[in-house]
Image: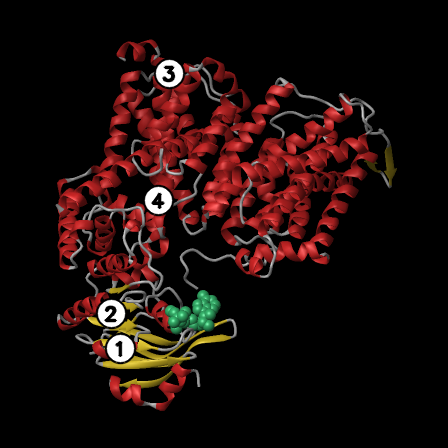
């Protein structure tokens, strides 16, 4: 079963059709790419999937379940994690606390035990901190754990956001231009991590402008232009299509 | 130090009562709610506690428990609709709530004594009681900060969109914050009643609302000790510098203004942020060497 | 009897509207609740009163002085309390706090100047003339209040919708960034907005000081609270809405006081405010687009 299935998804903003009749699917264990020129509607697709926007028409299925009209927080609890095109971190909180915040979905202790500080609630907190530290060391970031996240460089902030998304242990990961503004070396290091995650069975939808990066990672590629899907399929075949070239060259 | 406290016992009692009200304001702000309902909760709690002891002679703890419970109830009722509103509208709606409570207090003479208020309330609360209540409040707030509720509040306050993307129900947690604010406000009101001998509805109007806000703004909105420090500064300052006492209103105003513009995190949070940064830089340097 | 009450309600309502005009203007342009508006209004009333009592100026001059002082105090409030936050891009919450802070400073100054006394305009400052039509009595003062409130509201509307200045204000209100790209200087527009808002508050101060025959340092607070009701009824940031909202509030209040009880009327008014916020947070007539809670739409 595919992890994510979009069927005839559309979204209008008074008059402007930002996403127009888009259908494709994302499979677990694979990185699926979504590319397109500026304003093509890529971020809108991510916002629709994660429930931040309601679709005008069409449906969204997560592992067979219709999630197209569910509250965004509820969508997140069903196992969809996302990053934001313009990084959104808690800038004053420490890097570690930022990552710990991703574990919210896995909290088991009740409000009462949190209020009165039962051993179980304390235990849970320290477990989350340990797991967050593990994640940090996997991303080679342990030495920044206590720094306010806002003090980090741009590339490092992107990594923190990624770790926070992974902390939710999602079934589907939506990445909105995760390597924008990074150099090739940094980007490739992240690319390796994405590949490993996919190999472990995660479904990843990757939105990116950097063609080289996309071609090296994705097993399937979809091209959006002015809200419509103009090409889909195996990356090299897609890149060869005239329509894609035209969209990118502004033809 | 302890001589100073003994000599000014009544002043320190005031500081403790004020900071409980400050905590009622603190907890909503920490969760990113623009509530100003603290004065209303305090009024409801104060009248509940006072009536219990005046009419049926109930003991201190029963009165306080009732005040906190009814405050929680008021918080829950307010929270139901208000958690769905956005910032400015939450502020206006809670201001309206405070006005509604005052005018009911004035109107319902058979119960509240109307404009003349309730008099002859026994002084049941002493410094020891206040210390005990304050330590319980601090205990709950500190554990809450270290566990899931505090984390959720902090995320919601800083970025609602992030909170939602992590699966946090903003409305649910903000409702919890309203209820906690009601508990603390009701409790603070009950303590006021058992310390002041008398109550009138206007005790719980704009001035009280502004004081509660200023404790939090000056002391700090994040660290648990913020409101306590804020209340300490704002209550003691006019006493230590006597000439300032006549201009209490202006001093309060200037401090609020300076704090929000130049020290937006308040005294305690600014210091703790500073300290955390230094520690982080130090550990980083150690890690490199 | 009813007609008389409706007329009284109309006059009270127009004082509410007059007070709320400047308050809602600032909200409309800067999206900020200026809680110092009541204190600015008090400052204007003080200036007008001292112009009449101490400087023995005629009322129309005192009125102009009150408007000028209100405008200047309002600009100072912006300069000291709100502009620093704007530069930092701070939240609406910070603006509420700092305007409350400066309001307290102004009120403390008022308290010191007036020595906590209630002050009055000398008898005869405004000619006491009463007309009667079909059994309804209206004093010249009431007629003047009605007339002036309408006049000021319509002048403001004309200003905003028929002049170049107004176009600039509306452009900044919609987007500060876009308008500065168009060559408008937002800081000057804010300065002008605060001046106009304060001048309106000063005018309201004198008129209300005359109408209730009392001027004191706490006079702003009840009007500020009523202004919340007015702008929620009419829609936050809407000038026409403030006019309609003020009049509605005046009528509702007069009817509540005469048929129920005066201490219950406040409870009724604020419960009404509460209900409207829950049902229609954009106000009964508000068209203003307001983003819902978390970005979902
Ligand atoms: N909330 C909104 N309201 C109105 N229009 C919107 C909204 N969000 C997006 N749009 C419009 O929808 C179109 C698609 O925007 P979107 O952000 O999805 O593009 P994108 O493919 O992510 O572009 P980029 O590569 O620049 O990130 C744009 O024309 C944009 O202006
Ligand atoms: Mg985008």
Tag 1 subunit? A
Which numbered disc, 1 or 3, marks the residue closer to the eye?
1
Q: Which residue is label 4 attached to?
A: B31
In this view, B53 is above or below C206: above
Q: How many residues crowd around disc 3 within 10 Å: few (fewer than 14), some, or many (20 or more)?
A: some
Cα gap from disc 3 to disc 4, whole angstroms: 30 Å
Numbered badge on residue A233: none
| Residue sitting nearer the eye, C191 or A223 | C191
The C terminus of chain C sits in image quarter: bottom left
Given contact means CB atoms under 8 Å apart, are the residues at marks 1 and 3 in contact?
no
Q: Which residue is label 3 attached to?
A: B11
Label 4, secondary structure: give it: loop
Given contact means CB atoms under 8 Å apart, are the residues at marks 2 and 1 in contact?
yes
Given contact means CB atoms under 8 Å apart, are the residues at marks 1 and 4 in contact?
no
What is the tally of numbered marks visible in this picture? 4
* Disc on the earlier residue, 3 or 4: 3
């Amino acid at each position: 079963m595919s992890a994510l299935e979009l069927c005839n998804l559309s979204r209008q903003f008074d008059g402007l059709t930002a996403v127009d009749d888009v259908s494709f699917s994302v499979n677990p264990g694979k990185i699926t790419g979504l590319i397109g020129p500026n304003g093509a509607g890529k971020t809108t697709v991510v916002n629709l999937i994660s429930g931040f926007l309601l679709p005008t028409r069409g449906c969204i299925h997560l592992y067979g379940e219709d999630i197209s009209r569910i509250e965004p927080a509820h969508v997140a609890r069903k196992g969809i994690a996302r990053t934001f095109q313009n990084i959104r971190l808690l800038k004053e909180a420490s890097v570690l606390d930022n990552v710990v915040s991703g574990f919210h979905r896995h909290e088991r202790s009740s409000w009462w035990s949190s209020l009165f500080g039962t051993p179980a609630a304390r235990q849970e907190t320290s477990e989350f901190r340990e797991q967050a530290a593990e994640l940090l060391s996997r991303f080679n970031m342990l030495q920044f754990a206590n720094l306010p996240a806002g003090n980090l460089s741009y590339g490092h902030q992107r990594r923190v956001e990624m770790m926070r998304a992974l902390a939710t242990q999602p079934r589907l990961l939506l990445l909105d231009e995760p390597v924008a503004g990074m150099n090739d070396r940094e980007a490739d290091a992240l690319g390796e991590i994405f590949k490993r995650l996919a190999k472990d069975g995660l479904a990843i939808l990757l939105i990116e402008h950097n063609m080289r990066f996309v071609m090296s990672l994705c097993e399937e590629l979809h091209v959006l232009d002015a809200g419509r899907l103009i090409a889909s399929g195996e990356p090299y075949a897609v890149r060869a299509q005239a329509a894609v070239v035209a969209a990118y060259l502004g033809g | 130090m302890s001589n100073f406290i003994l000599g000014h016992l009544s002043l320190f009692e005031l500081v403790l009562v004020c900071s409980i009200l400050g905590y009622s304001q603190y907890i909503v702000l920490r969760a990113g709610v623009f509530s100003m309902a603290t004065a209303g909760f305090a009024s409801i709690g104060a009248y509940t506690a006072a009536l219990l002891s005046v009419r049926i002679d109930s003991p201190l703890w029963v009165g306080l428990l009732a005040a906190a419970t009814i405050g929680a109830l008021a918080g829950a009722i307010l929270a139901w609709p208000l958690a769905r509103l956005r910032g400015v509208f939450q502020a206006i709606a809670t201001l309206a709530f405070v006005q509604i409570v005052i005018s009911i207090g004035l109107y319902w003479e058979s119960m509240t004594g109307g404009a003349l208020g309730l008099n002859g309330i026994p002084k049941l609360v002493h410094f020891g009681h206040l210390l005990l209540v304050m330590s319980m409040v601090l205990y709950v707030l500190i554990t809450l900060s270290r566990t899931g509720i505090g984390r959720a509040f902090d995320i919601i306050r800083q970025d609602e969109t992030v909170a939602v993307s992590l699966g946090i129900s903003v409305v649910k947690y903000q409702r919890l914050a309203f209820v906690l604010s009601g508990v603390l406000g009701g409790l603070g009101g009950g303590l006021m009643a058992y310390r002041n001998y008398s109550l009138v509805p206007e005790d719980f109007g704009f001035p009280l609302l502004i004081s509660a806000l200023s404790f939090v703004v000056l002391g700090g909105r994040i660290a648990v000790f913020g409101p306590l420090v804020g209340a300490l500064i704002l209550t003691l300052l006019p006493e230590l510098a006597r000439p300032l006492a006549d201009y209490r209103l202006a001093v309060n105003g200037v401090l609020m203004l300076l704090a929000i513009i130049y020290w937006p995190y308040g005294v305690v949070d600014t210091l703790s942020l500073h300290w955390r940064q230094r520690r982080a830089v130090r550990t980083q340097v150690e890690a490199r060497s | 009897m009813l007609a008389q009450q409706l007329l009284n309600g109309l006059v009270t309502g127009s004082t509410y509207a007059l007070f709320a005009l400047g308050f809602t203007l600032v909200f409309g342009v800067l999206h900020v609740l200026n809680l110092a508006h009541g204190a600015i209004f008090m400052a204007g009333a003080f200036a007008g009163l001292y112009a009449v009592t101490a400087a023995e100026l005629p009322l129309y001059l005192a009125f102009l002085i009150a408007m000028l002082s209100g405008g200047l105090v309002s600009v100072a409030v912006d300069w000291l309390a709100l502009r620093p936050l704007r530069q930092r891009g701070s939240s609406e919450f910070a603006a509420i706090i700092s305007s409350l802070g400066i309001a307290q400073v102004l009120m403390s100054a008022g308290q010191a100047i007036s020595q906590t006394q209630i002050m009055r305009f000398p008898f005869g400052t405004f000619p006491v003339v009463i007309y009667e039509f079909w059994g309804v009595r209206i004093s010249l003062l009431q007629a003047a209040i009605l007339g002036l409130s309408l006049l000021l509201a319509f002048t403001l509307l004309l200003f905003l919708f028929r002049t170049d200045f107004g176009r600039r204000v509306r452009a900044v209100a919609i987007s500060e960034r876009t308008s500065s790209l168009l060559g408008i200087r937002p800081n000057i527009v804010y300065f002008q907005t605060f001046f106009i808002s304060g001048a309106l508050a000063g005018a309201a101060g004198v008129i209300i000081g005359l109408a209730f025959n009392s001027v004191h340092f706490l006079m702003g607070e009840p009007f500020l609270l009523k202004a919340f009701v007015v702008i929620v009824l009419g829609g936050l940031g809407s000038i026409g809405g403030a006019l309609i909202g003020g009049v509605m509030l005046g009528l509702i209040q007069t009817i509540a006081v005469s048929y129920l009880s005066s201490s219950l009327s406040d409870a009724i008014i604020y419960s009404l405010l509460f209900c409207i916020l829950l049902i229609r947070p954009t106000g009964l007539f508000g068209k203003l687009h307001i983003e819902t809670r978390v970005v979902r739409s």
